[in-house]
Amino acid sequence: MRNVVWLLLLTGCNLVKGLPKDHECRSALRTIVGLQFAYFSEHQKYSVHPVEIGFAPSQGNRYLYLFSSEGQLTRRDELASPPLGESVGYGPDSKRRPVLLEDLLAKLPPELRATTGLAGTCPACDVTIACVGNLDDDADVDVWTISTKDRPEAARGTPIHHLKDLP
């Protein structure tokens, strides 16, 4: 039991408050990279289309998930979205949260946005995915990325926290 409590504390979980708000993003990115690795093992390529690898965020998601720097995103509101097979990501659930896809996309630093998507020619390729969220309705955003390649800041499959929204 003591080990479980220490593990929860080390991962940032407060037993009173629950999981940290950025847990959604980190957990989703780890799921996405696992799906990408499985997709690659079968097709010898990665995909920038979430539906192709079997990813869709849960209802109430607070993050934008971006699989490519170019292309249309699936909205989580009443406005029109591209067909799922053409989408390169998902916006936040604007029905449940007061944040728009466009606001989060505009706050993603251009240098990070440029790194999202496929790099190289498959099968010698890699993919990098970003998630962007506003956790407390201020001007700051929370930005994470994950990649199928090793990066100076982290090994492949490890999320990197670029911008923090919360102190």
Image (cartoon, rainbow, N blue to C red):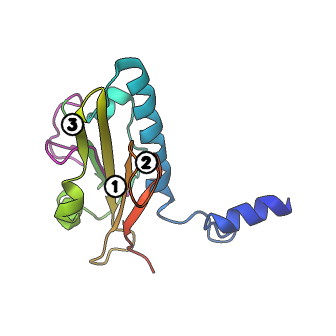
Q: Which of the 4 image quadrants contains residue 12?
A: bottom right
Of mark 3 and mark 1, the one earlier in the sequence is 3
What range of the chain is rendered magenta?
62-85
What type of secondary structure mainly makes up the magenta span?
loop
Secondary structure at numbered mark 3: loop
* Left or right of 3, for residue 125: left
Inspect the image, locate mark 2, and give the three-letter code of the amino acid beneath it: Leu
Crowd around label 1: few <14 · some 14–19 · many ≥20 (10 Å): many
Secondary structure at numbered mark 1: strand
Of mark 1 and mark 2, the one earlier in the sequence is 2
**Tag shown at residue 29:** 2
**Which quarter of the figure is the N terminus placed in?**
bottom right
Q: How far is the residue under mark 3 from the one under mark 2? A: 17 Å
Crowd around label 2: few <14 · some 14–19 · many ≥20 (10 Å): many
Q: Position of residue 14 (x, y in %)?
A: 65, 70
Inspect the image, locate mark 3, and give the three-letter code of the amino acid beneath it: Ser
From the image, tell me which residue sits under label 1: 131
The outermost residue toward the bottom is: 167
Using the image as rendered, state which of residue 68 and residue 75 is in the foreground: 68
Using the image as rendered, state which of residue 15 and residue 155 is in the foreground: 155
Q: Position of residue 109 (x, y in %)?
A: 21, 66
Q: Which of the 4 image quadrants contains residue 25?
A: bottom left
Q: Which of the 4 image quadrants contains residue 6?
A: bottom right
From the image, tell me which residue sits under label 3: 87
Q: Position of residue 90 (x, y in %)?
A: 28, 45
Q: Position of residue 153 (x, y in %)?
A: 42, 61
Q: Which dot, 3 or 2, sits closer to the camera?
A: 2
Circles 1 and 2: CB atoms closer than 8 Å: yes
**Which quarter of the figure is the C terminus placed in?**
bottom left
